Image: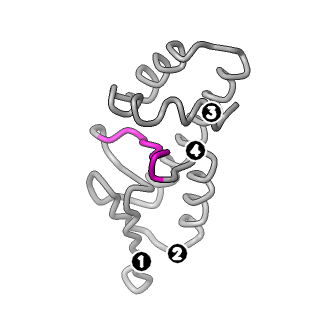
Amino acid sequence: MYFPAERTLASGDIFVFGDATPQLIDYAGGGSAKEWTTTLDSALQLDFDTVVPGHGNVTTRQEMRKFRDSTLALRNRVHEMVVQKKTRGEIATMLQTDYHWIPVLLERSLDGLIGELQ
């Protein structure tokens, strides 16, 4: 939801902020790594300063931009690994190490992510 008079965006789970919440691509719910960045780009076209994320503390537009860049980097890294014929296990390890994915995220998103980014 966008509140132009308050220069505030309530993003829902398209943007999460803080240490406790790594990116989740909800493939079962129709999510897409490719569309995620596009959706964030659309939101960033709005005129706001403050963001109420789906999870985490209220933050800034700049933090949302960093998150957007991180989702693009994640997507590009997984695509590179798929092209290099890295194993599912190698991709899972990278996501755990570099993006702090926990087992439930791997269970819910890894196969969809690999399939989408082939």
Identify whether 9 is placed above or below 40: below
Mark 1 and mark 3: Cα distance apart in space: 38 Å
Residues rendered magenta in the picture: 21-29
Q: Main secondary structure of the magenta part?
A: loop
Counting from the top left corner in percent of width and height, residue 86 is at 63, 13
For mark 1, what is the residue? 7
Q: Position of residue 113 (x, y in %)?
A: 56, 35
Q: CA distance from mark 2 to mark 4?
A: 24 Å
Disc 4 or disc 3, which is closer to the eye?
A: 3
**Horizontal side of residue 35 vs 2, given as left or right:** right
Residue denoted by label 2: 47
Find out whether the residues at labels 4 and 1 contact each other: C-beta distance under 8 Å: no
Tell me which label, 4 or 3, sits earlier in the chain. 4
CA separation, marks 4 and 3? Answer: 11 Å
The residue sitting at 43% across, 77% down in the picture is: 2
The residue singled out by tag 4 in the image is 33
What kind of element bears circle 1? Answer: loop
Mark 4 vs 1, N-terminal side: 1
Q: Residue at x 56, y 52 (%)?
A: 36
Is the Cβ of the residue at disc 2 closer than 8 Å to that at disc 1? Answer: yes
> What is the x, y in percent for residue 60?
40, 59
Dot 3: element: helix
Residue 112 falls in which quadrant of the image?
Answer: top right
- The reply to whether the magenta stretch includes residue 4 is no
Which callout, 2 or 4, points at the residue further toward the start of the chain?
4
As shown in the figure, which amino acid type bears the numbered disc 3? Gly
